[in-house]
């Protein structure tokens, strides 16, 4: 008798309690060896490839791509009977509708796909599934549904995480934005981000309430200066963390920013490289516009952004001259930070940037 191995979503650390099945790297009926790539799991803002802990035949995949499940959920069965007589895991997503799953033939689909079919008015018995062993997939159901207005696609992966994160920040943070101009004339703009990181870290030491978190009825003042940097990728906006910005030189910060930005765009960052920031900096370069009112990166209490830097007319010693001017914005949680202190912090950052110029 072949013993079945039930592989469960493991605890991936950092206090994570759930993960999204980003992509299966195997299919039902496939023979795999131990340590072969098994599944990609989306956690927080990164994707982790998990190898198979056992060798054998992939008997049954229990959780479809795009579903979010808690740690401990049985994801796949390796070995055992090949015809799927194992019960579906009780730890499968709670948001699934309670519906029986057919084991073979037409109409075979997971409860989640059945729920989508019911919402779209699609009869499963008339569909031929394109999934493993003829299983009907979400794509099969949506293709059979009457066309609606516009192109639709599920909110998945990084985009789903961003949506949840921003919704929570907008709901919980009492946000206010302060804006002032800064003269970047003497600053090498290739060093803009590391220079801003350094200026922010040094200024945060003077204004600790901006390097803090609000936890229940307590303000937690942090004594580390690990700053997030917003990086746009094809998958969405990621915020890798530059550690110890207060003790590193500009050159060291530049190397680390480049490394993290490359890792974000290639999807090679480790989960802990995307967590634990105490404050966030964002700059969109030429696309930035005059200034922004960015959303605070919860659970932080403030974020600083730099607008587009361009030649603008300014008055110096009674004369109108051209200078490289950009706007610095500080969005802050007014529950923790007073407006005057946020303004003083912003001016401290600008003063350091202009001194470096």
Image: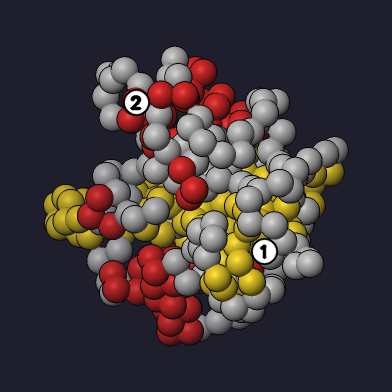
Residue 48 seen in render: no
Give the residue displayed 63% in from the left and 50% down from the top: 83
In this rendered view, identify the residue nearer to me: 97 or 348: 97
Instruction: Decide which of 208, 24 is in the foreground and name it.
Output: 24
The residue pinned by badge 2 equals 144
Would you place residue 338 above or below residue 191 in this image?
Answer: above
The residue sitting at the front extreme is 1
Residue drawn at x 29%, y 73% is 190
Of residues 236 and 170, the one nearer the viewer is 236
> In the rendered image, which quarter contains the C terminus?
bottom left
Q: Is residue 90 above or below residue 355?
A: above
Residue 313 rendering spot, x and y as whole percentages: 16, 50
Task: Report, in whole angstroms, how far the alpha carbon at label 1 lies from the one at label 2.
Answer: 32 Å
Q: Is residue 307 visible?
A: yes
Crowd around label 2: few <14 · some 14–19 · many ≥20 (10 Å): some
Residue 298 numbered tag: none
User: Which residue matches tag 1?
Assistant: 78
């Amino acid at each position: 008798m072949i013993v079945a191995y039930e592989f469960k979503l493991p605890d991936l650390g950092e206090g994570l309690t759930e993960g999204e099945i980003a992509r299966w790297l195997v299919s039902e009926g496939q023979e795999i060896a131990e340590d072969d790539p098994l599944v990609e799991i989306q956690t927080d803002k990164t994707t982790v490839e998990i190898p198979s802990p056992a060798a054998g035949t992939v008997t049954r995949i229990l959780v479809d791509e795009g579903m979010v499940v808690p740690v401990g959920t049985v994801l796949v069965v390796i070995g055992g009977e090949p015809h799927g007589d194992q019960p579906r895991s009780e730890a499968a997503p709670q948001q699934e509708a309670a519906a029986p799953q057919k084991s073979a033939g037409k109409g075979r689909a997971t409860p989640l796909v059945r729920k989508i079919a019911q919402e779209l008015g699609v009869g499963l018995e008339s569909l031929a599934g394109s999934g493993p062993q003829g299983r009907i997939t979400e794509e099969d159901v949506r293709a059979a549904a009457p066309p609606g207005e516009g192109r639709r696609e599920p909110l998945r992966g990084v985009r789903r995480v961003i949506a949840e994160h921003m919704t929570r920040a907008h709901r919980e943070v009492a946000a206010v934005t302060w804006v002032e101009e800064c003269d970047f004339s003497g600053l090498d703009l290739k060093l803009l981000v590391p220079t801003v990181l350094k200026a922010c870290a040094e200024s945060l030491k003077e204004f600790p309430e901006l390097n803090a978190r609000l936890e229940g009825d307590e303000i937690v003042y942090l004594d580390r200066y690990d700053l997030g940097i917003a990086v746009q990728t094809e998958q969405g906006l990621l915020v890798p963390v530059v550690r110890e910005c207060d003790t590193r030189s500009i050159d060291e910060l530049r190397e680390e920013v480049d490394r993290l930005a490359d890792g974000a765009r290639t999807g090679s960052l480790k989960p802990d490289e995307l967590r634990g920031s105490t404050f966030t900096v964002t700059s969109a370069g030429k696309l930035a516009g005059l200034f922004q009112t960015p959303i605070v990166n919860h659970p932080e209490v403030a974020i600083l952004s730099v607008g587009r830097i361009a030649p603008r007319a300014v008055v110096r010693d009674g004369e109108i001259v051209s200078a490289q001017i950009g706007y610095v914005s500080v969005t802050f949680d007014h529950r923790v930070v007073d407006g005057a202190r946020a303004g003083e912090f912003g001016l401290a950052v600008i003063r350091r940037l202009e001194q470096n110029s």
